[in-house]
Image (tube, rainbow, N blue to C red):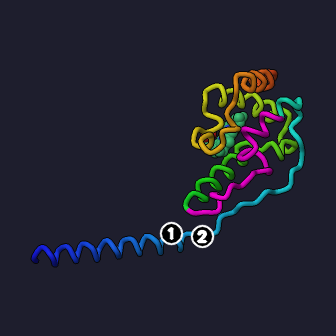
Amino acid sequence: MDVTTRMKLLRRIAQWSVAALAIALVAIQFVPVERTNPPVETEVPAAAEVRAVLRRACFDCHSNETVWPWYSRVAPVSWLVAHDVHEGREEMNFSTWNRLTTKEQDHAQRECWEKVGEGEMPPRLYLQPHPKAHLSAADRSVLRAWSLSKDGEDSDER
Ligand code: HEC
């Protein structure tokens, strides 16, 4: 194969690759993604200032009041967002707090500071496009006080 033929072949391959990628990107948009906000059953029983912090930094994934951004409509990012929301709600959902026993509520409340204190929540990837979810020192101490007002790990167990 001479140089010109090889160049032509390479160009052809590149063109097909771009076309295939474009088709794939269009095709994956048709994969159904669940972006529902089921009914809110209850309000977390916490002071208004606590609720404000939770709402600002946690509700997108831990409540049924998710604000679905435009990129949550574009695959493959939509898959990531939906996965986080569904998993987040499953782990702890402030909108269905009433479904937990008192003990489970205390446990979840306690765990909030564990996650936030360790810097695991809100997830770093989420903070990039959601600067408002950054917790100030004041926000953190509000959350900490609320969270630690419950006894630790099943302390009422013998
Ligand atoms: C971008 C979505 C998202 C946001 C925002 C978010 N979380 Fe989470 N959270 C998750 C996901 C997903 C999990 C489950 C996987 C894990 O533990 O990393 C989780 C797990 C947790 C757990 C563990 C629950 C359990 O039973 O183990 C706690 C507690 C928690 N989050 C608290 C918070 C708090 C408090 C905030 C706000 C300051 C927050 N999260 C913000 C997605 C999120």
**121 w.r.t. 144: above or below:** below
Quarter of the image for the N terminus: give it. Answer: bottom left
Residue labelled with disc 2: 31
Tell me the element at label 2. Answer: loop
Residue at figure coordinates x 66%, y 39% from the top left: 131
Residue 25 shows which numbered tag?
A: 1
Lower position in the chain sequence, tag 1 or tag 2: 1
In the displayed structure image, the side of residue 155 where residue 43 appears, left or right = right
Q: Amino acid at mark 1?
A: Leu
Q: Residue 37: name its quadrant.
A: bottom right
Point out residue 109 in the picture as x, y percentages from the top left corner.
77, 31
Residue at figure coordinates x 83%, y 46% from the top left: 95
Badge count:
2
Point out residue 76 in the picture as x, y percentages from the top left corner.
55, 61
Q: What stretch of residues is rendered in magenta?
A: 52-75
Q: Tell me if label 1 and label 2 are in contact, CB under 8 Å.
A: no
The quadrant of the rendered image in which ligand 1 is seen is top right
